[in-house]
Image: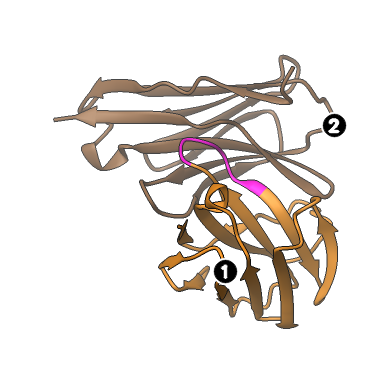
Chain colours: A brown, B orange
Amino acid sequence: QKEVEQDPGPLSVPEGAIVSLNCTYSNSAFQYFMWYRQYSRKGPELLMYTYSSGNKEDGRFTAQVDKSSKYISLFIRDSQPSDSATYLCAMMISDKLIFGTGTRLQVFP
Amino acid sequence: DTEVTQTPKHLVMGMTNKKSLKCEQHMGHRAMYWYKQKAKKPPELMFVYSYEKLSINESVPSRFSPECPNSSLLNLHLHALQPEDSALYLCASSQDFPLGGETQYFGPGTRLLVL
């Protein structure tokens, strides 16, 4: 079993939709949780960072962590074509950043 | 400023060539990383430098040789690579290492093609 599981997609939604991206993990020692956005042929860009259970909001993005269920989510409201990218969840434990496989999102006009 | 810069953006090299990738950050970060990313896969950690010393080598073949000349610069020297080494090479930095909650910031990557 992988330490971090993420549905690779692709996920295709119309502009304006609410997008839900999810990751599950098996190691309860993970303490910090991140979402990165990666456009094609570019480096990952940090979107959201959190370390506690609950919700964290930043503009159209909300990160949710449920440590009891070992589950994290990223919600994108009012999705735009410019949100089309691969979204990588990542989890931190002492000396390593463990990535999910990434979910490819396509928002069509 | 959370910028990590990498040069070159693209590199094509033959299997007998020697080339170097360069990474630079001016955020005062003390940890720098090299990752390799194949298409449709997540980044895979290769090396970690902390305070200019090599902290982690993820069993990377010796044809990849990292170097950290100072706290702002990180190089990756390439020699006798194989076609399967073609990938996006990403540099990242963080405030400190081991990671105590510091986030990693990534550069745009160097897209390497080995012929």
Q: Residues within 10 Å of mark 1 (few under 14, many from 20)?
A: few
Q: Is residue B67 above or below residue A55?
A: below
- Nearest the viewer among A11 and A64 is A11
Instruction: Please give the residue where the numbered disc 1 appears in the rendered image.
Output: B16
Q: Is residue A77 visible?
A: no
Q: Is residue A41 visible?
A: yes
Question: Is residue B114 one of those drawn in magenta?
Answer: no
Tell me the quarter of the picture where residue A55 sits: top right
Q: Chain of mark 2?
A: A
Tell me which amino acid carries mark 1.
Thr
For label 2, the SS is loop
- On the image, the x and y values in percent for residue B31 come to 74, 67
Q: Quadrant of the C terminus of chain B?
A: bottom left
Instruction: Please give the residue where the numbered disc 2 appears in the rendered image.
Output: A29
Magenta highlight: main SS: loop
Q: Residue at x 47, y 60 (%)?
A: B112
Q: Residue farthest to the bottom?
A: B70
Q: Residues within 10 Å of mark 2 (few under 14, many from 20)?
A: few
Q: Chain of mark 1?
A: B
Q: Residue farthest to the left?
A: A109
Q: Residue at x 82, y 50 (%)?
A: A95
Q: Which residues are magenta?
A: B39-44
Q: Is residue A103 above or below residue B11?
A: above
Q: Residue at x 36, y 46 (%)?
A: A40
Tell me the quarter of the picture where residue B19 sits: bottom right
- On the image, the x and y values in percent for residue B23 come to 57, 74
- On the image, the x and y values in percent for residue B76 come to 64, 70
Measure how far apart labels 2 and 1 are at the Cα level.
44 Å
- Give the side of residue A3 with respect to residue A55, left or right: right
Total marks placed = 2
- On the image, the x and y values in percent for residue A12 come to 29, 21
Tell me which amino acid carries mark 2.
Ala
